[in-house]
Image (spheres, rainbow, N blue to C red):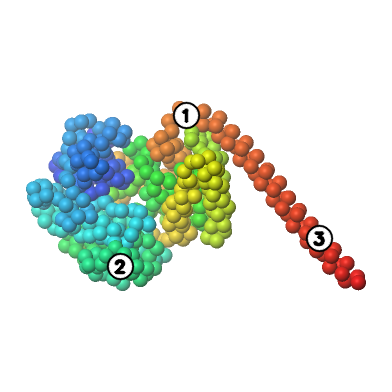
Amino acid sequence: MTETKMKSEVADFYNGQAVFITGATGFLGKVLLEKLLRSCPGIESIYILIRAKKNKNVLERTDQLFMDQIYKKLEKTTMSKVMPINGDVSLPGLGISETDRATLTEKVSVVFHSAATVRFVDPLKHTLITNLRGTNEVINLCKEMKHLKSFLYVSTAYSHCVRREIDEIVYDIPMSPEQLLNCCEWMTDDQMEFMAPHIMENWPNPYAYSKALSENLVKKRCENMPAAIFRPSIVVSGAQEPLPGWNDNLNGPTGITAGITMGIIRSMNADKDVNADLVPVDYVVNSMIASAWDVGTNKLPLQVFNFTSGGRNPLTWGRFRELLISVGFDAPPLKALWYFCFFIIKSTRMHNFVVSILHFLPAILLDMVSTLLGKKRRFFRLYQKIDQQTSAPAYFALRQWEFKDDNVLSTIKRMTPEDRKIFRCDIADLDWATYMGDYYLGMRQYVLKDDPSTVPEALKRYKKLHYLHRGLQVVMLIGFLGIALKFFTLIAAGVSSVATSLQF
């Protein structure tokens, strides 16, 4: 029996409904769109907010979106349900035309708002305009919808990371979202960036802070609406859907994993005993779809769903490294630059020292060689970018939180056995050893673009890199011993000289 023929209360909720999705071109949004089309065949239409980009209009970008291999299972008649809406969450009114706005307010009954800038290093004002003001504009639109049944705002489990215990509630913060929205109107980018440390207080980055503000905004403005806040932790590659190990970006742990296996990254500032709290994107999307169903049918006041793994199926960073090593050597990247050699270091000072020796020193030497050969120097800048991208997540890799997930468990209990199969979202069912194998091979195939057929060739090349790696280690060891011997010789000479002086 196929999943579309199985009795599904969750899928039935979407029958005849029009859905509106923001962020449909992002990693999470792509999987959400695919799953809704495939597992909720009764959906009438799905409107996606999409903006013109790189000389391509919204229709061209939609066609480009559907060229991704994750949509190959879908029939053209199914994909014809998708209606692109020209707009941008960073613009007033979402940049939507009056005609499109009228269509959405008349037809849409379920809204998933997942669009956001997720970069930790983006300027505060840019982040607030996209994440906070964008959410405010989506709420304005929802309030105009005549048939709204469910509004799901996608936040992050780390929105209130200044606390160690995080329940499924919205916590108050010192500055109100209205104050920050007002600041965005009159403060320049430079002024807000100057004030950022004072504004954010203990929050580690603009992304987490903007999510805390947005949650407070949803709490205040959606009190009498069928709404919920969905908080996933670190979203990574799919476990089973749309394809095992599928991913389309180098964000978060995937970028670090790619850098490690390529021989570029040697050290990660993390605590090996801390929970990584990874959640596969298909589990996240299935839980989002079920949570929206729960909101629309349970009709409870504003709910918060903490979708995390650390409490019920923990995976530490140390175990992550062990599993990565166990699969990485069997299928190295075809274009690996060096042999796999990677450390998890808890001490930030020691991590920075190792990075200086194993990242920046070789980069300087390679840039010197490039200069002598008349080529452009690029390695030091490359490692500066890598260091910036890998340093930002260290805050989360060195700390552990206790997340309560009673609402998530309650939704799972409400689901029928059939729905638990179709919309698999119980993180306790995930086998990390199996998943990490698919995660790594998926990263290799879909992110690094290495076809599985290239594994034998990659292994031959990796063997040569192994010999070079060991040879370099021997040379460095001999050099170190030579320096040490010289050092002790000088000390011995000094001691002998002092002893001779004392004899006189």
Kind of residue at badge 3: Ala
Q: Nearer the viewer, residue 216 or 186?
A: 186
Which residue is disc 2 drawn over?
191
| 284 over 497 or under it: above or below | above
Q: CA distance from mark 3 to mark 1?
A: 56 Å
Q: Is 16 positioned to the left or the right of 124 in the image? A: left
Rendered position, 202 above or below 40 = below
Q: Position of residue 30 (x, y in %)?
A: 28, 42
Of helix, strand and loop, which one carries label 2? helix
Query: Which label's residue is closer to the chain start, 3 or 1?
Result: 1
SS state under label 1? helix
Q: Quadrant of residue 350?
A: bottom right
> Of 130 and 404, which appears nearest the observer?
130
Residue displayed at 36% across by 41% down: 248
Q: Position of residue 271 (x, y in %)?
A: 51, 57
Residue shown at the point (46%, 52%) measured from the top left: 384
Q: Which residue is mark 3?
A: 492
Decide: is 163 above or below 89: below
Q: Amino acid at mark 1?
A: Thr
- Please name the residue that numbered disc 1 is placed on: 454
3D distance between C-alphas at marks 1 and 2: 51 Å
Disc on the earlier residue, 1 or 2: 2
